């Protein structure tokens, strides 16, 4: 299971704007291109582990600062989908 977590975290740590928008669309998460760009930039510069609750909470707080609380809530829902897979 650890390898699965590493693959997902690696993907998130290297996600592009277009990839984030693709996943958001796939999981019916509403996010603007501008917000996706800012979020992707943040995710690429920080080492994230969405399988760690504290780490994910910090990421969601930062995303709320970037794109607002509703977008952060939606991105968190997307992260939860990734961790359930």
Image: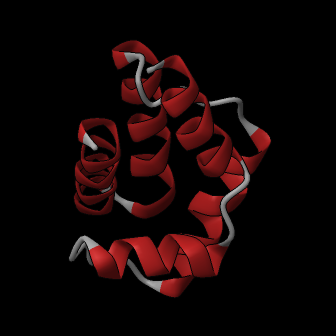
Q: Is residue 16 left or right of residue 32?
A: right
Q: Position of residue 6 (x, y in %)?
A: 60, 29
User: In the rendered image, which quarter is residue 30 located in?
Assistant: bottom left
The image's colouring method is secondary structure
Q: Residue at x 39, y 49 (%)?
A: 64
33 or 25: nearer the eye?
25
Q: Residue at x 50, y 32 (%)?
A: 4
* Figure check: 63 above or below 84: below
Q: Is residue 37 left or right of residue 81?
A: right
User: In the rendered image, which quarter is residue 3 located in?
Assistant: top right
1 or 31: nearer the eye?
1
Q: Position of residue 32 (x, y in %)?
A: 43, 83
Q: Residue at x 70, y 29 (%)?
A: 47
Q: Look at the image and tell me in which quarter the C terminus lies.
A: top left
Q: Look at the image and tell me in which quarter the N terminus lies.
A: top left
Q: Is residue 21 left or right of residue 30?
A: right
79 or 71: nearer the eye?
79
Residue located farthest toward the right when viewing the structure as drawn:
45
Q: Position of residue 28 (x, y in %)?
A: 21, 77
The number of discs equals 0
User: In the rendered image, which quarter is residue 8 located in?
Assistant: top right
* Figure check: 8 above or below 33: above
14 or 39: nearer the eye?
14
* Figure check: 21 above or below 60: below
Q: Position of residue 61 (x, y in %)?
A: 40, 36
* Figure check: 42 above or below 62: below
């Amino acid at each position: 299971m650890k390898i699965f977590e590493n693959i997902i975290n690696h993907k998130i740590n290297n996600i592009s704007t277009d990839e984030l928008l693709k996943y958001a669309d796939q999981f019916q998460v509403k996010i603007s291109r501008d917000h996706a760009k800012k979020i992707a930039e943040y995710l690429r510069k920080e080492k994230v582990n969405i399988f760690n609750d504290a780490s994910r909470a910090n990421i969601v707080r930062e995303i709320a600062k970037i794109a607002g609380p509703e977008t952060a809530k939606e991105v968190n829902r997307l992260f939860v989908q990734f961790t359930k897979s």
